[in-house]
Image: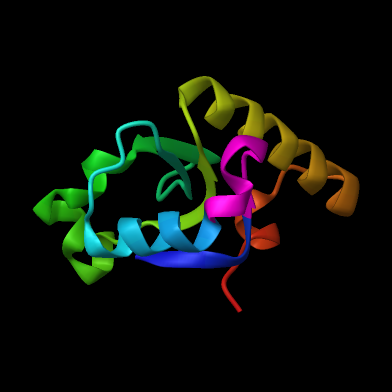
Amino acid sequence: MRFYKRLYMSPSIKDKRRQIVWKLRTGRPQPTIYVIALAKNNDLFEIYHSAMLKQRYFRQKENSPYIVGVAGGYRAAVDLVTDMLTDVWTATNSYNVKEYFKPD
């Protein structure tokens, strides 16, 4: 799985960034963590519970999600998506999130 360089984090978990990212990479359980990834289809984002990333499907390189945000709960993930869309609109005057969050 790949992570956005300037990963968005909800305020409640911002100080645990390194630990959370490490646990996501190694498949450790995190019952309250949700990740926000760029959608592979025409949608903007997808919100996954961290346990879904342990499935074999996501371990394959071509199906690996590009994670742009991490939140401590589903409601926090929805709020974080709202903040992300606001930032995209402010920076580009459009909602082209795939271009805004493209990997370097």
Residue 31: where, in percent of width, then height? 30, 33
In this view of the protein, which residue sits in the foreground, 94 or 27?
A: 27
Q: Residue furthest bottom?
A: 104
Q: Position of residue 63 (x, y in %)?
A: 26, 59
**Residue shown at the point (62%, 39%) measured from the top left:** 10
Location of the C terminus (image quadrant): bottom right
Closer-to-camera residue (93/79): 79
Q: Quadrant of the N terminus?
A: bottom left
Q: How many labels sit on residues?
A: 0
* Left or right: residue 75 compared with residue 86: left
Residue 34: image quadrant is top left
Q: Residue furthest top?
A: 75
Q: Position of residue 43 (x, y in %)?
A: 50, 37
Q: In this view of the protein, which residue sits in the foreground, 23 or 36?
A: 23
Left or right: residue 14 compared with residue 42: right
Residue 99 at x, y = what percent? 66, 61
Q: What type of secondary structure mainly makes up the magenta span? A: helix
Q: Is residue 11 magenta?
A: yes
Q: Residue at x 69, y 30 (%)?
A: 82
Range covered by the magenta-colored residues: 8-16
Left or right: where does residue 56 sit relative to residue 9?
Answer: left
Instruction: Report the colour scheme.
Output: rainbow
- Which residue: 31% across, 64% down? 25
Does the magenta portion include 20?
no
Residue drawn where x is 23% and y is 41% of the image: 52
Residue 51 sits above or below residue 62 on the image: above
- Residue at the extreme left: 56
